[in-house]
Amino acid sequence: MKVFFGTVLQLVAVVVVAAAGGQALTAVQGNPWLMLAVGGGSAVVALFVYKGLVRLTERRRVVEASAKGLVPGLLLGAAVGIAIFGGVIVNIWFLGFYHVHGAAANVGMIGLFGYMAAAAVTEELMFRGILFRVLERGTGTWLAMLISGLLFGAYHLANPDASLWGAAAIVVEAGGMLTAAYVATRKLWVPIGLHFGWNYAAAAIFSTEVSGNGGNQGLLDATMQGPALVTGGDFGPEGSLYSMVFCVLTAIVFLVIAWRRGRLVPLRKRAARLATLDAVPTLSQ
């Protein structure tokens, strides 16, 4: 019961920070510098709230959000996220469904940096730092990955232009890939960077919809039209079969790393295995 209330407290606190940050970002929309400040501030506050409550309710060091490996983890994750999304767009462009009309440095890219940073940090804290981590202790890695992935997909149904297909794609892509990145590293930095890099590339570089949120204008002045299974339709490229393939392949790589490092937790051995994970080096070290 104590664990349950601690988990609920952590989750509610991060959700409150995310909601307050979202409202603040809406209030300053149109001012990229304020969006950068508010988004970055929301991300930092969420991390401090998470770490403080985990220490309070679980009486342990918050290894998964420790400063060690923060910068290399974020940079590695962001690079992978941008590269994967770029690969998706290149394939859609090759088929003639993505058209670039020009390119120009857009001040809106600055505001999107703050917006995507806040989204990546708060969502990773909620779904990997809290839900997956706690579920894994009772169910093992595989079932916890499935349940937290389904919840993550359902969470995105509230977005404009969301669809059941888009939510299902999120379950496979982000629920699998981002969770696998966490399992491989046992830290939040690579999945946060990966989440940010993917979203920032979608909105601020390639000017596409992000999980059903459209109207993004970034570096490239571009349009995309074509079959929904290829382009993702109104949901954006995350609903594309290319995204599913790229993200599944990336998830497999992370899961192989996790398996080689002994970080996959089967149900029957969950307690003993989880007790040893804090001492294992991370992918970004």
Image: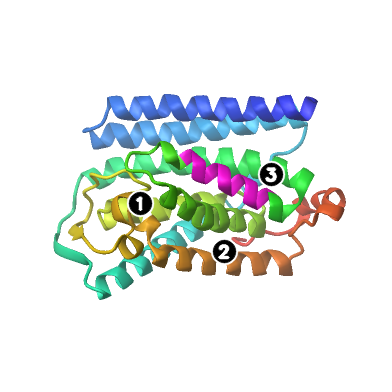
Label 2 sits on residue: 251
Lateral position of residue 102 relative to residue 157, left or right: left
Label 3 sits on residue: 133
Give the CA distance from mark 1 to mark 3.
26 Å
Where on the picture, by quarter, is residue 62? top right
* Residue 98 image position (x, y, % from top left): 22, 65
Residue 56 in view, yes or no: no
* Residue 24 image position (x, y, % from top left): 35, 25
* Residue at the limit of the structure toward the bottom, as seen here: 94
Type of secondary structure dominating the magenta stretch: helix
Region of the chain picked out in magenta, as a range: 144-155
Give the number of the mark in front: 2 or 1.
2
Q: Is residue 114 magenta?
A: no
Figure quadrant of the C terminus = bottom right
Density class for disc 3 (Cα within 10 Å; few <14, some 14-19, many ≥20) is many
User: Please, what secondary structure does the residue beneath circle 2 have?
Assistant: helix
Density class for disc 2 (Cα within 10 Å; few <14, some 14-19, many ≥20) is many
- What amino acid type should be assigned to the residue bearing mark 1? Tyr
- Of marks 1 and 3, which one's residue comes earlier in the chain? 3
Give the CA distance from mark 2 to mark 3.
17 Å
* Residue 222 image position (x, y, % from top left): 18, 59
- What amino acid type should be assigned to the residue bearing mark 2? Ala
Lateral position of residue 122 relative to residue 227, left or right: right
- What amino acid type should be assigned to the residue bearing mark 3? Arg
Establish if 95 lies above or below 23: below
